[in-house]
Structure formats: structure tokens, C-alpha cells
């Protein structure tokens, strides 16, 4: 788990190939009325709440989002700190917290919820047992969380991937959304043989799920793709020979898929608590030349309890427009 405490990059988003607009709170939101039929908004959050103060602030955030015109909410992982207990009681408390969202809520697993649960401060749990408990509580059925729900397609629908219920996809407004279980703490690689075996199996399933997402987007002529993971893949700076890098295979597979996909792709993650929008991937054959249709968005995270509004606008060649939604301190 990375713990960068900076609020985020507030620099030249207009150069990033994705439209970014900044609004201080939901009181200044544009009206949903009058928009084209394919325009819609969704909310991004992650890496909250970590402590009692953030639990209080998260209640304000939930109210703010509940009062907003969004189709659904995505939490990209870490609903607790790495030093808070990985207990069943806390898991169930967080489940109830996420159920307070009026809109459908899609939750992507983070490392603090299972990978890091072996830490003494987190209770010294067996991380794989905690992963099984996460799946039991948070991936029941084929519906999202939230008071209203949407249908999710799970990788576990295929028998050979039956345990990977957390890998999902859904479609909204001709955009393909997919959640893939890639977490911080080096994606659970390099701690011991048992966890390395877990990584190897999940990593293989993740690569298959990523490739299937692009295949679906092409077959359905989707307007674009949104990929949501938890872990920051080392800011995508991965040496080719980095054998013990838990993100190497995922990033290489992503770059391979992008070579044959020209529509907008947005990858959302949390983990390092550093709000940013940038273009971190370069063309292998032309070092220093960015892959222009790919954009990374990192969500706000502890200690900052805010959210991002993403507007899908088919009339915008970049497809995605992003607004900061700042929860005022009171």
C-alpha cells in the first residue's frame, strides 16, 4: 500500500486528451435535464474511509452523491486502512455503509481488505481466508450493491474461473465497464510461496478478463472502455525484465490490446491516494510518444474524502469529461 499524502495534480489537464472541469461541490452541478439521450454521469471513489473522521466525512459524501444525477458509483478498493482490523465485524459494517448509496454501487477489491491483513496491526489474519470472506460478503448474486442495483456479468460464470466473482463487466450507454482484481502491495506477489500461487492463478484470470473486455468492446462497437482496478501499477514504469513486479503482465497485456483498439480507454485506480489524470503509457516503437487514446485516472483517497464525477459525452471526441466534487469541510 502506498501512502502518498498529496492532494493531487492540478496541472494542465487540457493537454491530456480528456476533458477535465473542476467544480467545488454538488451545489454547482450542471442540470441533467436537456442532455442528449446517451449522455450520463457516474461517480468514482476509493481508499476511504480509513478512520473515524473519514467515516463521518464519508456520510457527507454519500449524501452528496445520493443527491446527484449519476447512474452508478464505483469504489475502487480499500474501504479500510492497512492498520485497522480485518474482522468480520468491520467487513459487515463496510457492507452496510456501501448499501447506503441510493445508486448502484460497484466495489472493486483493494489490498487493505485482504492482501495486507497478515500485518499484526490488522489482526494477523490469513490473507487468503480474508479474500474468501470478501467474496462471500460482497459478491453475492449477479447484482451490484446499492439500494438500486444493476446486473453484473461475472467471470465466475465460466466454470474454470468460478472463484473470481469479483471480476465483472457491465455496459451503460454503449460504454463497456470492467472491474479487474489487481491490487496494491505488488498485487500479492513476492511475500511467500502460498501467496505467489494465489497471484499466479488470479493474474492469469485477470489477463483473460482484460482481453475479453476488449473483444466485447470491438464486437459490440462500444464507444469506449473503462477499466477499474485498485492497485497503482508502479505508475506504469515497469522494466521489461521485472520478473517480481506484480503488475508487469497486466500492463504488458493492456499495451498489447491498445495496439489494436483506437477508441477512448480510461483506466481508473486508487492505492496511492494521489488524484491525477494523465497519459502514462508510451508507444514501445516510439519511446516518449504517448498512447493518445489511453488515460489514467486516480481517485481521491485518505485523508481526502471527495469524489469524481465522470460524464460520458459521445459528442466529445475524448468521450469522458471529469469533474472534481469537493465535499466542503464543516
Image (cartoon, rainbow, N blue to C red):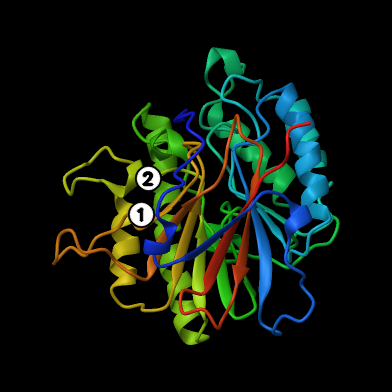
Q: Is 329 placed above or below 181 here?
A: above
In contact (CB < 8 Å): disc 1 and disc 2: yes
Q: Residues within 10 Å of mark 1 (few under 14, many from 20)?
A: some
> For the point 26% across and 46% down, which residue is it?
237
Residue 30 located left or right of residue 96: left
- Residue 233 tag number: 2
What distance separates the C-alpha of mark 1 from that of mark 2? 9 Å
Residue 99 seen in the current view: no
Examine the rendering and report whether any part of residue 185 can be seen: yes
First in sequence: mark 1 or mark 2? 2
- Residue 102: image quadrant is bottom right
At numbered mark 2, what does the secondary structure look like: helix, strand or loop? loop
State whether residue 156 is above or below residue 275.
below
* Horizontal side, residue 115 vs residue 52: left or right: left
Residue at image position (44%, 30%) is: 2
Q: Locate residue 246, reporting x and y percent.
A: 34, 42
Q: Residue furthest top?
A: 120
Q: Position of residue 219 (x, y in %)?
A: 48, 86
Between circles 1 and 2, the one closer to the viewer is: 2
The percent coordinates of residue 55 (x first, y second) are 75, 30
Specify the label residue 234 is tagged with: none
| Residue shown at 55% from the left, 46% from the top | 299
Q: Which residue does the numbered mark 1 point to in the structure image?
A: 250
Amino acid at each position: 500500500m502506498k501512502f502518498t499524502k498529496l492532494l493531487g495534480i492540478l496541472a494542465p489537464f487540457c493537454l491530456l486528451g480528456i476533458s477535465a472541469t473542476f467544480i467545488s461541490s454538488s451545489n454547482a452541478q450542471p442540470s441533467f435535464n436537456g442532455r442528449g439521450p446517451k449522455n450520463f454521469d457516474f461517480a468514482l471513489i476509493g481508499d476511504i474511509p480509513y478512520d473515524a473522521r473519514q467515516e463521518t466525512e464519508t456520510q457527507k459524501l454519500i449524501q452528496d452523491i445520493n443527491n446527484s444525477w449519476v447512474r452508478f458509483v464505483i469504489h475502487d478498493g480499500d474501504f479500510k486502512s492497512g492498520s485497522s482490523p480485518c474482522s468480520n465485524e468491520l467487513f459487515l459494517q463496510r457492507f452496510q455503509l456501501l448499501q447506503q448509496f441510493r445508486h448502484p454501487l460497484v466495489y472493486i477489491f483493494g489490498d487493505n481488505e485482504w492482501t495486507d491483513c497478515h500485518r499484526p496491526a490488522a489482526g494477523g489474519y490469513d490473507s487468503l481466508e480474508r479474500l474468501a470472506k470478501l467474496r462471500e460478503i460482497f459478491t453475492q448474486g449477479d447484482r451490484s450493491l446499492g439500494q438500486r442495483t444493476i446486473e453484473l456479468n461475472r467471470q465466475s460464470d465460466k466454470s474454470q474461473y468460478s472463484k473470481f466473482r469479483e471480476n465483472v463487466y457491465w455496459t451503460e450507454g454503449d460504454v463497456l465497464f470492467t472491474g479487474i482484481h489487481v491490487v496494491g502491495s505488488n498485487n500479492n506477489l513476492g511475500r511467500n510461496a502460498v501467496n505467489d500461487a494465489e497471484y499466479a492463478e488470479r493474474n492469469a484470470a485477470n489477463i483473460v478478463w482484460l482481453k475479453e473486455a476488449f473483444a466485447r468492446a470491438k464486437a459490440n462497437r462500444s464507444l469506449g472502455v473503462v477499466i477499474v482496478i485498485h492497485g497503482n501499477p508502479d505508475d506504469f514504469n515497469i522494466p521489461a525484465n521485472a520478473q517480481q513486479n506484480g503488475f508487469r503482465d497486466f500492463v504488458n497485456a493492456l499495451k498489447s490490446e491498445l495496439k489494436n483498439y483506437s477508441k477512448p480507454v480510461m483506466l481508473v485506480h486508487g492505492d496511492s491516494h494521489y488524484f491525477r489524470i494523465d497519459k502514462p503509457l508510451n508507444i514501445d516503437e516510439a519511446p516518449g510518444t504517448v498512447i493518445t487514446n489511453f488515460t489514467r485516472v486516480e481517485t481521491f483517497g485518505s485523508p481526502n474524502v471527495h469524489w469524481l464525477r465522470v460524464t460520458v459525452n459521445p459528442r466529445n471526441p475524448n468521450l469522458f469529461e471529469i469533474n472534481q466534487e469537493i465535499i466542503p469541510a464543516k
